[in-house]
Image: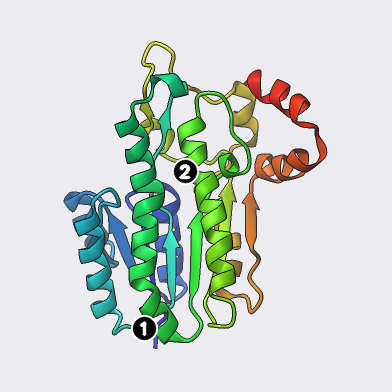
């Protein structure tokens, strides 16, 4: 029997690459996208398309019901990959913009995971894998809203992992650094006259979305999945630097980017 996995944010980038790869590895892939046209494209590609808007509680509930029924209440894995970024100085963000950032990146993810938890537990050894970011490890100027949503995801994942100890369901975080995707193109910039851009040096360390696949395979298939999987040299470096440098020195480095 094929192992089933729900992947969110499948319209492009990491989600699409993961769906294509896991389908080749024999998984039954439920590919979730926000737009109906993208859902239809997922079906054409041989996946089971699921319409899901993480910012809409009713959409999340309906998608969870679909996946539960289609998987026969036996879901092996959930790859929480969907999300987007709001960039801009914090004083330029309205409460509504900040709420929407958390609604998509965190609250919707929480709702979806909890609704699917019975199907994961029924499987006897499920996996929950959450896409965080190097910005879940440290924050930078004008990326504070997005970083805050990923910081929250990191803490939430740690708590869920401990709460599920002994159930057979394992929780892991994938922490990408710079990856070539459409994420940056889709960022909501609150300061159009001063858009947030990656520093030019980041291009040297940017990897294609396929770079996450070895980490994803290990998180899904190893008997001993890791708690965290940094991806790209930047993510590995920041994990170490954050521990070694004093706060004032780290601030000085990050302010210059």
User: Looking at the image, which is closer to me, 84 or 92?
Assistant: 92
C-alpha separation, residue under disc 1 versus residue under disc 2: 29 Å
Quadrant where the C terminus is found in the figure: top right
The answer to whether 138 is drawn above or below residue 217 in the figure is above
How has the structure been colored for display? rainbow
Residue 198, picture quadrant: top right
Quadrant where the N terminus is found in the figure: bottom left
Residue to which mark 2 is pinned: 149
| Residue closest to the far top | 193
The image position of residue 171, as x and y in percent, is: 55, 67
Mark 1 vs mark 2: in front:
2
The image position of residue 220, as x and y in percent, is: 54, 71
Is 189 on the left-hand or right-hand side of 58? Answer: right
Residue 201, picture quadrant: top right
Q: Secondary structure at mark 1?
A: loop
User: Looking at the image, which is closer to me, 253 or 246?
Assistant: 246
Residue 239, picture quadrant: top right
Q: Secondary structure at mark 2?
A: helix
Is 238 on the left-hand or right-hand side of 39? Answer: right
Q: Residue 32 shows which numbered tag?
A: none
Residue 45 visible, this angle = yes
Residue to which mark 1 is pinned: 74
How many residues crowd around disc 2 within 10 Å: few (fewer than 14), some, or many (20 or more)?
many
The image position of residue 159, as x and y in percent, is: 56, 63
The image position of residue 186, as x and y in percent, is: 35, 34
Q: Residue at x 36, y 16 (%)?
A: 192
């Amino acid at each position: 029997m094929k192992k089933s996995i729900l992947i969110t944010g499948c319209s492009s980038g990491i989600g699409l690459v993961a769906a294509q790869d896991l389908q080749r590895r024999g998984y039954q892939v439920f590919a979730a996208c926000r737009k109906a046209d993208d859902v239809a494209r997922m079906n054409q590609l041989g996946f089971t398309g699921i319409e899901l808007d993480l910012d809409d509680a009713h959409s999340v509930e309906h998608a969870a019901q679909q996946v539960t029924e289609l998987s026969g209440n036996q879901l092996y894995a959930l790859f929480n990959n969907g999300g987007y970024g709001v960039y801009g100085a914090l004083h330029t963000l309205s409460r509504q913009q900040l709420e929407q950032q958390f609604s998509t990146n965190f609250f919707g993810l929480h709702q979806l995971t909890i609704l699917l938890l019975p199907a994961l537990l029924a499987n006897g050894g499920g996996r929950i894998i959450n896409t965080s970011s190097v910005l879940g490890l440290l924050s930078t100027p004008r990326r504070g809203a997005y970083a805050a949503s990923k910081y929250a995801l990191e803490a939430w994942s740690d708590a869920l992992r401990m709460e599920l100890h002994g159930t057979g369901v394992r929780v892991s975080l994938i922490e990408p650094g710079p990856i070539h995707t459409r994420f940056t193109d889709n960022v909501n910039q609150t300061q159009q006259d001063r858009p947030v851009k990656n520093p030019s040096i980041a291009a040297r360390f940017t990897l294609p979305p396929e770079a996450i696949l070895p980490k994803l395979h290990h998180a899904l298939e190893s008997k001993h999945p890791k708690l965290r999987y940094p991806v790209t040299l930047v993510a590995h470096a920041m994990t170490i630097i954050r521990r070694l440098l004093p706060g004032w020195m780290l601030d000085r480095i990050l302010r210059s980017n």
